[in-house]
Amino acid sequence: MASSLKPPEVSMELHAINREKLLNSLRQHLTETSRPLHGFVFLQGGEEQNRYCTDHTELFRQESYFAYLFGVRDPGFYGAIDIATGKSILFAPRLPPEYAVWLGKIKSLPFIQETYKVSMVYYTDEIVGVLHDQYKGSGKPLLFLLHGLNTDSNRFSKPADFEGIEKFKTELNMLHPVLSECRVLKSDLELAHIQFANDISSEAHVEVMRNTKVGMKEYQLESMFLHHTYMYGGCRHCSYTCICATGENSAVLHYGHAAAPNDRTFKDGDMALLDMGAEYNFYGSDITCSFPVNGKFTNDQKLIYNAVLEAHNAVINAMKPEVSWVDMHKLAEKIILEALKKGSAIIGNVEDMMVERLGAVFMPHGLGHFLGIDTHDTGGYPKGAERPKEPGLKSLRTSRELCEGMVITVEPGCYFIDALLVPAMENAKTSKFFNREVIGRFKDFGGVRIESDVLVTSNGSKNMTNVPRETGEIEAVMAGAPWPLNKKI
């Protein structure tokens, strides 16, 4: 099915606003610490990577902090922002004449300046001279370099390096926390890109749902999604590797990797869990739909699905500024446990289950994460913030209170994972909660996850994702009904 959506114009004003936001925040930090307002924010963009020792160049995607500030799509760039004047400077690689033969016209410096709307553009071999000329302070110019820990990957960002860096003073501690925090609250232009990524991805999810048939391969569902978002949304990149899990594979939280490559043939009676999101102009989406591959929910499938849906909806309804994300995770856990108890899968007092962290057996991952230029966007654990240590809660990618302008995923799930269920059913403190006969029915069920991207507003929240969620809506769409439905199901 064709799309009525049209990719929005990419405006470099978005990145100019991001630079201004950083500049204001950095100047405030310098003032508060009685330091002079001079020096340069200095970042190194991403480099193209080849496949091992071959000459095959992998498709380039810009380093995220550099993309946030400059919007540059090409590899090999450096960027600077003069803290004293606010001027922005790009340094482009000086390309050899052969580039024009094999890779296309070499872009002139004026063309690059006009494209990216920066104050000045020079070549990378001019960095030392240009920054010394621009610097108004005394002594060696000061460079604020990006160095800090990503709390999702436990890896450090790479500070810029270039020939002649020894002619500068460098500061490695201030920029990373300030810039990471700038990325937490989104501007209107950022939100427009995230919304489009959600719109085209939502539409693609519906298209996949409508065309799923028993006997297909999981990768065929991935292929339909990728085609739709690229064909109609111009989204060449995905936010992450697609998870197209069916049957028991849907209990594998990060299925779809090279060793589990979305290659199962799914059968009548299976549930599908499809976690897929397109990226538009660096900004991502992250959407999960779960549904029966034959288009009709069984009673057991409805039990688990509606438990997760109730948790998903309750969290979104409760979200507003100053609400604790840890509390939202616990709310989702409690609702799922109550539903499982109602369905006789577990027995006993739900409050006692919460104390023993039984919810983490069924939902071992965190409730959600910040979303933006990265799928797991920055700022989850700023300096001084503590990560919870209890099962389930320790997997939260943030423990912060919500603020207006945050975009965060709401993705509760309920899974039947032997590696967690078996120990819990043998544990003296938790074994009493399980109805083994009913749990046994779900041994090969897999799991359900429902994920939407949600903007925190001044007095509540806005769901940016638009896909069928109620069981009746899903069954209607899979039977050929339009989406949105013409009448309430």
Image (cartoon, helix red, strand yellow):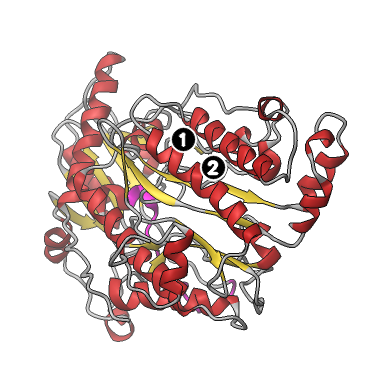
- Residue topped by disc 1: 380
Q: Quadrant of the N terminus?
A: bottom left
Residue 54 appears in the rendering: no
Residue for point 42% across, 70% down = 476
Tell whether position 59 is magenta: yes
Tell whether position 108 is magenta: no
Q: Toward which corner of the image does residue 408 lie, by quadrant? A: top left
Q: Quadrant of the C terminus?
A: bottom left
Q: Position of residue 364 (x, y in %)?
A: 65, 43
Q: Secondary structure at mark 1?
A: loop
- Residue topped by disc 2: 152
Q: At label 1, which amino acid type do we have?
A: Gly
**Label 1 environment density (alpha carbons within 10 Å; few <14, some 14–19, many ≥20):** many
Of residue 390 and residue 363, the one placed in the foreground of this image is 363
**Real-space CA distance between mark 1 and mark 2, rounded to the nearest whole angstrom:** 8 Å
Of residue 469 and residue 74, the one placed in the foreground of this image is 469
Q: In the rendered view, would you say 281 is above or below 453?
A: below
Q: Position of residue 347 (x, y in %)?
A: 75, 36
Magenta stretch, residue numbers: 52-66
**Label 2 environment density (alpha carbons within 10 Å; few <14, some 14–19, many ≥20):** some
Of pointers 1 and 2, the one earlier in the residue sequence: 2
Residues tagged 1 and 2 counted as in contact (Cβ below 8 A): yes
Disc count in the image?
2
Q: At label 2, which amino acid type do we have?
A: Asp
Q: Secondary structure at mark 2?
A: loop
Q: Position of residue 312 (x, y in %)?
A: 47, 45
Is residue 305 rendered to the left or right of residue 235?
A: right
Q: Toward which corner of the image does residue 63 lie, by quadrant? A: bottom left
